[in-house]
Image (cartoon, rainbow, N blue to C red):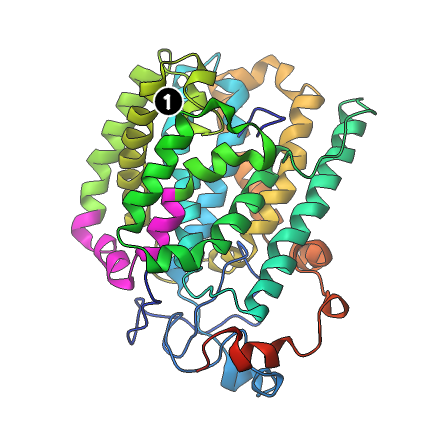
Amino acid sequence: MSRSHLPGQRPVTPRGDHAAPLPASASVPAALPLEKPPTTHGQDGEGAERADEPRALAERPAKQSAKPRDAFFDNAKYLAIVLVAMGHAWEPLRGDSRTAAALYITVYTFHMPAFIVISGYFSRSFDASPARLKRLVTGVAVPYVIFEVAYTFFKRWADDDPTYPISLLDPWYLTWFLVALFVWRLTTPLWKIVHWPVPLALAVAVLASVSPDIGDDLDLQRVLQFLPFFVLGLVLKPEHFQLVRRREARMLAVPVFAAALLFAYWAAPRMNAAWFYRRDSAQELAAPGWSGAVMTLAMFGCSVVLVACFFAWVPRRKMWFTALGAGTLYGYLLHGFVAKGSRFWDWYDLQWLHTPLGEITVTLAAAALITSLCTPPVQRLFRFAMEPDLKSAFRRDVAGIAGRGGGPRS
């Protein structure tokens, strides 16, 4: 994060998009604030309920308008957010443990790219209609403002820094992702109409990596350097995810991950881990400008391979943690208070944490924490911040505006 220095295509709508879609859970709050494509069959069918349809449609009986969820994606979101929490927990251990550093590098190669690919995949239906824009504001922009302010006051208190300023232009710690998602989703209609969207997004990322004058406003370096993963998600089709669900893909993922871990173990003392944060240009990392282009392309390739391997290992059936996939944004933003507090309060000064047993304990504690923060009780408690009800802030005829010309109708 800039202040903390931590970390097209028309919607595809074939029948039966994902394997074994499961019945919708009783309450389905946004995990990441994902755009939900029109759904009739599975999660991406066409021709039925849309988020921007008139109120009469929304008032149909719940049983009739239920939207089945694919357990695969909920499982993937939960497992990715657990890896995010583990990565944050391992960071202070890297200096004393080469193994922790290797795991850190490996996980940072693919955990946020996987999260972002899923975000892009579920943003394919975004069309900039009034109802979609309303949802973008309430589900992304408003939580950003709330948590940026909350994190600032937390730092003032926990770090004994009463003058630390509030700046909505300079995302602090985890809030950069909300800024990035807001920008990426607004550009979705553009990526749907251009030729070769992924190569074009890669070119933008390369240019950003060699442009030290971009500055820190809105963490634009991260927004641009992670952009190719969002665009990749936009252009992926259900059949691409079916490929990685095959038995051959799961078997191939084992030696690939083993090779990645071995390479990370070798690279840990030799490589600047800041490359994986994508918050700086090459010049800001004391590297020649041309290396920014090389590293951007190389890391994109490595990340895509490991993301595919990660998806290959994600269970397809309903698991005990499947329902937690609907609360990943809660876990992501809330665990930041503990992650940062552990640094402010010097928890890692305890020497036993830097032993193998301590490292295992920290890993399990991070997984347990993030799991608890994704549970329904926590979602209900913090829904006012994550999914605020701002009906009075918008015109009451938003759905009607959308129907008259703000977006396609079913």
The picture places residue 184, in percent across and down from the top left corner, at 48, 49
In the picture of the structure, the residue carrying the numbered disc 1 is 102
| Residue at the limit of the structure toward the left, as seen here | 248
Q: Is residue 90 magenta?
A: no
The picture places residue 386, in percent across and down from the top left corner, at 66, 55
| Residue at the limit of the structure toward the right, as seen here | 162
**Is 360 located above or below residue 335 in the figure?**
above
Which residue occupies the foreground of this view, 95 or 401? 401
Task: Please tell me which residue is depicted at 29% across the width and 76% down the height of the picture.
Answer: 15
The picture places residue 171, in percent across and down from the top left corner, at 63, 36
Element carrying mark 1: helix
Q: Quadrant of the N terminus?
A: top right
**Is 171 located above or below residue 356 in the figure?**
below
The picture places residue 109, in percent across and down from the top left corner, at 37, 32
Q: Is residue 364 visible?
A: yes
Q: Which residues are magenta?
A: 228-249
- In the image, what residue type sits under mark 1? Ala
